[in-house]
Image (spheres, helix red, strand yellow):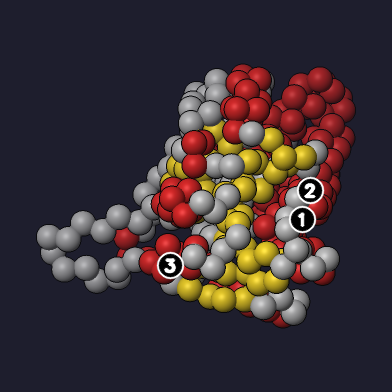
Amino acid sequence: MSDWRAIVAAIATDNRSGATAIAIRAAEAIAALAQHDDFTHEALSAFIPALVAAQPSMAPLFHLANEVLGAVEEAGPVDWRHAARQAAQARAEALRASPQAIARHVVAATSPLSVVLTHSASAAVAAALRLGYAQGRVARAICTESRPQNEGQALARDLAAAGLPVTFVVDAAAYEALAQADAVWIGADALAAAGVVNKIGSAGLAVLAGQRGVPVRVLAGRDKVWPAALSPAPPVADRDPAEVWAEAPPGISVVNRYFDLTPWWAVSAVVMEDGAFPPETVQALAQRVKIHPALRP
């Protein structure tokens, strides 16, 4: 049996994968561990909250934990392993299907030959750009570098390999690039009552897009809804300053933060698996999320 602490550590240090990909890995780990007799109920009870704490800004991990803990509690001491495995596998399947479902809705509402600007690397946005290009709705994508990990490079490379024309720009050129864009599509790590948690730079991009009259659509599934009963938005921790400036001189304080909070007033719509919704609808969903007692602070 793999050490669940090593799995948590690997997820905690993953600074390139999106929230959906990380949640799928976590679900697969739960399903695999639940098959081992030496993985006890006590270990599961420690493992699940530790997964959430490993990436506390990512709502899909919370929903995975919430569903597994609820299923295990309902199943009881005899069938808890089967329940944990079933719940984790079902959540992984739903996460894999989500990007394509979201893509179909946003592409259907996109004008032909649109130029779309995106920031960071979202699975749903990538799926939508590929589908939009295949259907003649997207003519070109503009990808930002998305510092400090530059995951925008990987997205641009993958899109170009699929045949989609791509323009790649540094983050500071986002405002200038908006002059060429018909829409901004971004993903989300969490859809919170206070706003959209996504890669740092998303908030500024959304505000600038509004000034230029470019609509901002957030492509994110219902697994991204953050429970308002926990907090208005998930916590955002500072990361290793050396990622930004490895040998900063004394007297310079380097801030390295991966996520920011885009206010809802800067968002045109949220596109989910079952359609596009105004921000008010998503805020109402956040108010209705139930929380397992083990995940309460």
Q: Which mark is residue 176?
A: 3
Confirm or deny contact between disc 2 and disc 1 (CB under 8 A): yes
Tally of marks? 3
Q: Reading the chain from its start, which is encountered first: label 3 or label 1?
A: 1
Q: Residue at x 84, y 41 (%)?
A: 90
Confirm or deny contact between disc 2 and disc 3 (CB under 8 A): no
Q: Residue at x 72, y 28 (%)?
A: 69
Q: Name the secondary structure under disc 2.
A: helix
Residue 281: percent from left, percent from top = 65, 28
Between the C-alphas of marks 3 and 1, the distance is 24 Å
- Place residue 64 in its image quadrant: top right
Q: Which mark is residue 107?
A: 1
Give neighbour class at mark 3: few <14, some 14-19, many 20+ (Cα, 10 Å).
few
**Depth check, front residue: 185 or 292:** 185
Between the C-alphas of marks 2 and 1, the distance is 6 Å
Q: Residue at x 69, y 35 (%)?
A: 277
Q: Reading the chain from its start, which is encountered first: label 2 or label 3?
A: 2
Q: Is residue 257 left or right of residue 250?
A: right
**Type of residue at label 1?**
Val
Identify the residue position indicated by label 2 in the image: 105
Residue 123: percent from left, percent from top = 69, 57
